[in-house]
Image: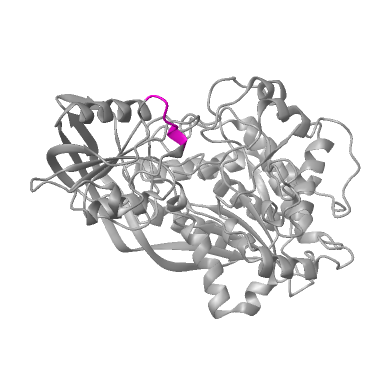
Amino acid sequence: MRTRALALGAAALLATISFISPSPASAIDTVNTKKLRKAVTVSGILRHERALQRIANQNDGTRASGTPGYQASVDYVVRKMTKAGYDVKTQEFTFPFYRDLAAPELTVAGTSYETATFQYSGSGDVTGPVISVLDNQIPPGSDPSSSNAGCEAADFPAAPAEPAIALIQRGTCTFEIKADNALAAGYEAVIIFNEGQVGRQELLTGTLSNPKSIPIVGLSFEDGAKLYAATQAGPVEGTVFTSTETDLEAKTYNVIADSPTGRNPDEVVVVGAHLDSVVEGPGINDNGSGSATILEIAEELQELKYLKRNRLQRQVRFIFFGAEEAGLLGSDYYVKNLEENDEAELERIYANLNFDMLGSPNYARLVYDGDGSATTEEPDEPDDAGPPGSEAIEKIFTDYFESQGLATEPTAFDGRSDYGPFIAEGIPAGGLFSGAEDIKTVEQVALYGGTAGVAFDKCYHQACDTINNLNTKALSELGDAAAHATLVLARSKTGLYPDGSLVAKQKAHKVAAAKDYKGHAAVR
């Protein structure tokens, strides 16, 4: 459901790598972080990861928001952060909770097809004719990437009196629009198959913006083409089965933990990671690794007495977000709540660091591309970059890795994690990522080791994302970099704007080019 593309072709990859060569420190990097980096250990991170695994084991193998496993994860973080001396509170909000109660089934003309239930699909067991809508781009000579099937009411042939199943190709408009049009036309189930262009051929999984009353399932392009051909030869009968649970007012929480106020009371550094997993698994890499890492950093800041008065220039606020996997809902609620109820507090947020997956087994050292210079075709356009100051945060990370003799590469700063709502408000952000479902290249193996042709995390969003799905070398390298950036932003006297010249630009960015970040439901 969440795509994190590197946005780099293989030919361009090496040109964008930060190679392992000496580099002068950036203007902001004047903070000695060695003691904290030494104190933040893989053993400490794994201690928290094992606790999260035990919680999942005791709660049906999941820590998803809206489940007892997530509540137990919240309770664990609250205990640990309170013990470490932080001012801790939980922030409750509601969201539409969804999960599959049984595996979906799709059978057409006696043949079973691999399928996936769309998030927020309804339940049902529908048998009837499968009817292809207009504009499915399958015939020889057609362009699969030009499909706009199901985007207009006129695309749908009249549904027969008996229950009928609409067959629709991905493309142009959102899944939500296609599903709503099918429902309005009288169809009682929907199959949406992948588009067929490069990167859009596999089994389609997707998310709807709102819960539906009918079954909606996904299909690969190859299988969709087979069904399309069958419908053109004459009437064909199929069965779609789904069993789902949706609670539109499920409760969940963000955990917010504040250090004492820094020397500058008007500046707060938010260090965030999402605490929830997907329903399908325990989420020990996604995102137990980010949560466990910032928890370890927070504890060691206290242990090294950085929380004592006047040792920090800026207050550090650790936030463990809920419902990220449902569409960045926790971070979005946090930011919007400040905007609506405490704008002065929103103005205090100086920067956001985001850590979402730091222990991928086939990992890479990926740094969010704050200035957009390497992951967009037109980097000079403001929408391609984070708010002013994001480029300085990126440089904190790249300078640190270079000082350690470690190569990095940029990853798209596209708003698809919890920093999205912050950059939409003009707040500079940055962070690290060790890779998800994308495939590792030969060039990347030369830089990081691992295996080419295999996903960075082959257990991404699956039940196998357990304590055995972690690379301790990744946790060590990226954990140290996370600790370094946290302390640099908290203690640097110069900060992101040494001469103050970027402050006005930051405000202008919010007004003129606030990033239109898009959550899971916007995927087309």
Residue lying at the far left in this picture: please name it.
161
The quadrant of the picture occupied by the N terminus is top left
Viewer-proximal residue among 94 and 492: 94
Residue 449, image quadrant? top right
User: Do we see residue 40 in this rendering?
Assistant: yes
Residue 46, image quadrant? top right
240 w.r.t. 268: above or below: above
> In the image, is residue 142 part of the stretch drawn in magenta?
yes
* Residue 420, x across and y down, in percent: 58, 57
Residue at x 57%, y 61% (from the top left corner): 421
Q: Main secondary structure of the magenta part?
A: loop
* Residue 307, x across and y down, in percent: 71, 63
Viewer-proximal residue among 258 and 361: 361
Residue at x 82%, y 61% (from the top left corner): 495
Q: Is residue 445 left or right of residue 399?
A: left
Viewer-proximal residue among 117 and 98: 117
User: Do we see residue 465 in this rendering?
Assistant: no
Range shown magenta: 140-145
293 w.r.t. 22: above or below: below
* Residue 56, x across and y down, in percent: 38, 44
The colour scheme is: one colour
Residue at x 41%, y 32% (from the top left corner): 464
